[in-house]
Amino acid sequence: MKKIWFAIVRLCGWKYDIPEPGTRPELGHCVIVVAPHTSADDYLLGIACLWKLNINHHIFIKKEFFNVFTRRLLVKYGAVPVDRGNRNNGMVQQAVEHFNNEKDWTLVVTPEGTRKAVKRWKRGFYEIAMAANVPIVLAYLDYGRKVMGVGPVFHPTGDFAADLPKIMEFYRDKQARYPENYNKECGVQ
């Protein structure tokens, strides 16, 4: 299945910006932030990039997507069910427990939290990285250039207000599938 998906992505004109093993950042135990996120296609493309990276990745997905027909497939591809309708869902603690209990566990997060335009990124990715003491790796999908890849490693300082503008600077030149739904000034005051 992976080979077929790689071929489809390539036929659509997409390329990968992934450093070779040995020269890329450590991706086996980190939070990977992916932006911009304005389309369901982002996941379909992003999964190819994650497969190319060959890491034990996980992604939080609404529990409503898990049913008798989809559960096995979603779990196989790293999905972890979460109650997004409940603000006190323990998502941060759940992720921290995985990081603490598993050697190679990588969480992939789209901090916009939705495909619609937002004023601010959700800060859960940052809180998870801080609590688990893991780095944040910046990854992207650039529809303008049809390139997806992995950027720099960011080590959070604990000062979200100071760190977010530095993170956002990396994404400033990345084009979303639906640019009108991507706020390049998101959270930067």
Image (spheres, rainbow, N blue to C red):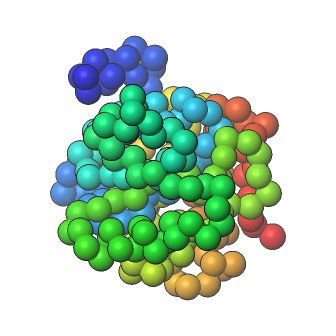
Residue at far top of view: 11
Q: Residue at x 46, y 74 (%)?
A: 93
For the point 24% across and 57% down, which residue is it? 23
Residue 14 spot, x, y in % from top left? 44, 26
| Rendered view: 9 above or below 76 | above
- The spot of residue 43 in percent (x, y) is 49, 36
| 62 horizontally vs 137: left or right | right
- Looking at the rendering, which quadrant does residue 167 occupy? bottom right
Residue 88 placement: quadrant: bottom right
- Using the rendered view, name the quadrant where residue 5 is placed: top left
User: In terms of depth relative to the viewer, which is nearer, 93 or 2?
Assistant: 93
Residue 129 appears in view: no
Labels in figure, total: 0
Q: Position of residue 36 (x, y in %)?
A: 61, 45
How far across and how far down the image is residue 71, in percent? 37, 38
- Res. 135 in view: yes
Above-or-below relation of 27 to 3: below
Residue projecting furthest to the bottom: 158
Q: Residue at x 79, y 57 (%)?
A: 119
Question: Does residue 95 lie above or below 34 as drawn?
Answer: below
For image coordinates 39% across by 78% down, the residue present is: 132
Residue sitting nearer the eye, 16 or 59: 59
**Quarter the C terminus occupies:** bottom right
Quadrant holding the N terminus:
top left
